[in-house]
Image: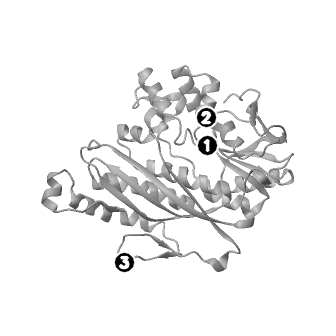
């Protein structure tokens, strides 16, 4: 989380980089980052790298998994609303929930924040959200970078990205090759659009001249705050589910929607037949569709529509899987079944009314 601090103080300040602000931002971050510490972390006195000891005695055949992502244009909405404490949770969710699709347990993350001007309190809010996401995922935040880019970005503008690493036993890697005919498809509820489709969200807001600060009764809150609802982090839930039942595959439902993402976790020759009538999409999706005049096909190709993670489990373990998730406070249901086909996920029927 070190700020970019090369060059002489006076000259760099004249160029628009505030070294002192960067150092204060680092100080403010420390209490957030400390929450995420895991026992495998190794202290690097220089602070140039994050160190993490892999306990090889714990694994028979450890395979490292890695993923990197950002939060897309949802970050622009956070800036409009001047709300910066949850966008970091979105970042973690996008990264670690890709890792667990392989069956990996997330171990650690690093982050990168670029901003037009370092405002220590704002940077600390962002990192506080990243730390909260890591806490929810059970992984350590072991390093990162905050870079000031005057001239390239406006003073209030920022963007963030992250990378995560996890570990899975070589003989326990999940994926299409494990999926079998008759497997049950289990849906896990999303908290909203998560961090996908926000170019369309912002287009709808602009074209329909919507007020982000307006109370929207059908959404139960202020529009902008509802749209900034942080991504649900499923990592711990998926790790626990994999340990308890026979999971064959996961699918993290991100950009492209439910069918497109689940198809990536299916082998050739098998389809996942999904029933829309098993759930009612969250009100925010109906609101966006109505205000933007967006049809169902485009909505389903852009948003998760209320399903953020999917597990494909052995048929005999379906009820037990639902019980495990319920015990962990995850709303989940039978979404469909795996049948002979051509390697696609297919949505049938009509959505249930909310």
Looking at the image, tell me whether mark 3 or mark 1 is earlier in sequence order: 3
Image side of residue 92 versus residue 45, left or right: right
Mark toward the viewer: 3 or 1: 3
The answer for how far apart the CA atoms under marks 3 and 1 are is 40 Å
Quarter of the view holding residue 22: bottom left
Residue in view at x 55 percent, y 26 percent: 287
The residue tagged 1 is 190
Is the Cβ of the residue at disc 1 closer than 8 Å to that at disc 2? yes
The residue tagged 3 is 45
- Secondary structure, mark 2, is loop
Looking at the image, which is closer to me, 15 or 302?
A: 15
Looking at the image, which is closer to me, 320 or 58?
A: 58
Is the Cβ of the residue at disc 3 closer than 8 Å to that at disc 2? no
**Residue 194 x %, y %:** 54, 42
Is the Cβ of the residue at disc 3 closer than 8 Å to that at disc 1? no
Looking at the image, which is closer to me, 211 or 100?
A: 100
Q: Which mark is residue 279?
A: none
- Secondary structure, mark 3, is loop
């Amino acid at each position: 989380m070190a700020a970019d601090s090369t060059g002489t103080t006076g000259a760099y300040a004249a160029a628009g980089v505030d070294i002192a602000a960067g150092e204060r931002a680092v100080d403010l971050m420390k209490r957030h980052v400390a929450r995420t510490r895991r026992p495998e972390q190794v202290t690097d006195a220089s602070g140039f790298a994050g160190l993490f000891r892999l306990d090889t005695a714990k694994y028979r055949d450890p395979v490292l998994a890695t993923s990197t992502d950002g939060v897309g244009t949802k970050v622009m909405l956070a800036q409009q609303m001047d709300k910066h404490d949850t966008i970091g949770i979105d970042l973690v969710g996008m990264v670690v929930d890709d890792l667990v699709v392989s069956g990996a347990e997330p171990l650690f993350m690093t982050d990168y924040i670029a901003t037009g001007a370092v405002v220590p309190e704002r940077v600390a809010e962002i990192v506080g959200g990243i730390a909260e996401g890591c806490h929810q995922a059970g992984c350590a935040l072991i390093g990162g970078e905050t870079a000031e880019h005057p001239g390239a970005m406006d003073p209030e503008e920022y963007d963030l990205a992250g990378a995560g690493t996890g570990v899975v036993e070589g003989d326990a890697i999940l994926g299409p090759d494990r999926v079998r005919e008759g497997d049950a498809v289990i849906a896990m509820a999303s908290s909203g659009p998560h961090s996908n489709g926000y170019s369309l969200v912002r287009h709808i807001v602009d074209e329909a001249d919507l007020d982000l600060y307006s109370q929207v009764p059908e959404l139960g809150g202020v529009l902008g705050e509802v749209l900034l609802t942080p991504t649900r982090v499923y990592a711990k839930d998926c790790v626990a589910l994999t340990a308890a039942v026979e999971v064959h595959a996961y699918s993290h439902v991100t950009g492209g929607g439910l069918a497109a993402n689940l198809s990536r976790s299916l082998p050739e020759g098998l389809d996942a037949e999904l029933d829309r009538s098993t759930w009612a999409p969250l009100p925010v999706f109906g609101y966006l569709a109505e205000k933007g005049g967006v049809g169902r096909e485009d909505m389903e190709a852009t948003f998760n529509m209320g399903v953020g993670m999917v597990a494909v489990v052995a048929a005999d373990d379906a009820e037990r899987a639902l019980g495990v998730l319920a015990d962990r406070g995850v709303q989940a249901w039978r979404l469909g079944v795996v049948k002979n086909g051509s390697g696609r996920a297919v949505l049938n029927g009509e959505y249930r009314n909310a």
